[in-house]
Amino acid sequence: MVEDVKKFTEELIKSLVSEPDLVKVQDFQDEEENPIIEIMVSESDMGRVIGKSGKIAKAVRTLIQAAAFNKGIKRVKINIDSF
């Protein structure tokens, strides 16, 4: 189930950035077995993913949460970072 959300996240982020080949999406679990999705984009694409006042990042998080909920995952944590 988490794999489907991970693939959705990767496709979503790749559609936003100018360098889609550099996008990396990984999934982990915290101490309480809750899934964590980590999104890594290039430094030059951070502005595109975060957006003005964080509006795009908030929308991305909402879409990922909705996709996870549809797959039966009640809560997922999303980290966005650059390299």
Image: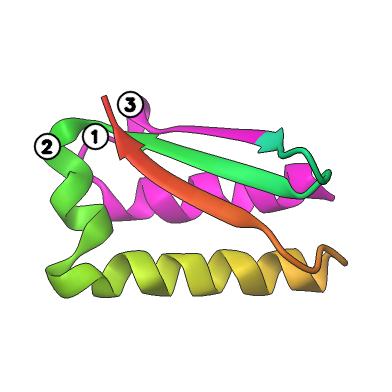
Q: Nearer the viewer, mark 3 or mark 2?
A: 2
In the rendered image, which residue does mark 2 sit on? Answer: 44
Figure colour scheme: rainbow
Residue highlighted by disc 3: 22
Q: Which residue is mark 1?
A: 19
Question: Element under label 1?
Answer: loop
Quarter occupied by the C terminus: top left
Question: In the drawing, does residue 27 fall left or right of residue 71?
Answer: left
Query: Which image quadrant for residue 69?
Result: bottom right
Report the number of discs.
3
Which mark is in front, 2 or 1? 2
Q: Is residue 14 above or below residue 56?
A: above
Task: Tell me what residue is drawn at x 63 percent, y 69 percent.
Answer: 65
Q: Is the Cβ of the residue at disc 1 closer than 8 Å to that at disc 3?
A: yes
Query: Within the image, what quadrant is residue 19 found in?
Result: top left
Please, what is the three-letter code of the amino acid marked with disc 3? Leu
Residue pictured at 20% horizontal, 46% vertical: 46
Res. 43 mark: none
Position of residue 55 measured from the top left corner of the image (x, y, whole percent):
26, 75
Residues rendered magenta in the picture: 1-27
Foreground pick, 81 / 67: 81
Question: How far is mark 1 from mark 3, CA to CA?
Answer: 6 Å
Residue 25 % position (x, y): 52, 35
CB contact under 8 Å: marks 2 and 1: yes
